[in-house]
Amino acid sequence: MIYILESISMNKTILALILLCSLVACVGKRQELVSPEPQELALAEIQELVDPAFVYRDGITYLAESTEPLTAHISKRNKYSRLSETYTVKEGKREGLYRLFWEDGQLLQEGNYLNGQYAGMWRRWYRNGRLEYERDFVNGKREGWTREWDENGTLRIEMKLINGERVLIRFFDKNGQVKE
């Protein structure tokens, strides 16, 4: 797996080690890491990394061989060089918009992270492009509305959670009418 990294702050020794490792093997998936402000980076800060480039300790993401939490934008590519996943890591935790793509490049899932936890509305789509579900999250836990559709686009389930307790659930028939 190949990684391209544009990072705001990294130890020069680690950069040299990473560059050396990148010259040894370059096979498989491609993963790009782009800092939040790539226009401010020197060309020397762009490196290719060989998997495994990241380590995870206590819920924090680090660049391998580093003690400093990672801050970068990550873009992964599939074997066809199509975008497969994008997200940002800030001080070692996922932050902001997350997107996952089907192998053909069509959007599969989208949502946001706040301080490493699910936040707000998360959505997932079927291969045919129709919405599969949408779920609200607060502090990493499902809270608020959840709706699920079948592959034809018919609403099947609607549920509301308050403080983790289900306060409403409705099931719908194949015509989208509430089941009694």
Image (spheres, rainbow, N blue to C red):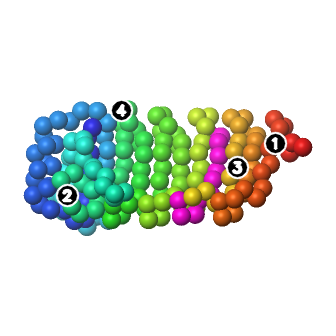
Give the mark nearest the N terminus, 4 or 1. Answer: 4
The disc labelled 4 sits on which kind of residue? Lys
Callout 4: few (<14), some (14-19), or many (20+) C-alpha neighbours within 10 Å?
few
Looking at the rendered image, the disc whose residue lies closer to the viewer, 4 or 2, is 2
Q: Which residue corresponds to mark 1? A: 172
Secondary element at tag 4:
loop
Where residue 55 sits in the image (x, y, percent)? Answer: 27, 50
The answer to whether marks 4 and 1 mark residues whose Cβ atoms lie closer than 8 Å is no
Decide: is 81 above or below 141.
Answer: above
Q: Which residue corresponds to mark 3? A: 147
Give the mark nearest the N terminus, 4 or 2. Answer: 2
Which dot marks residue 120?
none
71 to the left or right of 152 = left
Looking at the rendered image, the disc whose residue lies closer to the viewer, 4 or 1, is 1
Where residue 112 sits in the image (x, y, percent)? Answer: 51, 58
Q: Quadrant of residue 58?
A: bottom left
Looking at the rendered image, the disc whose residue lies closer to the viewer, 3 or 4, is 3
Which dot marks residue 79?
4
Give the mark nearest the N terminus, 3 or 4. Answer: 4
Secondary element at tag 1:
loop
Which dot marks residue 66?
2
Q: CA distance from mark 4 to mark 2?
A: 28 Å
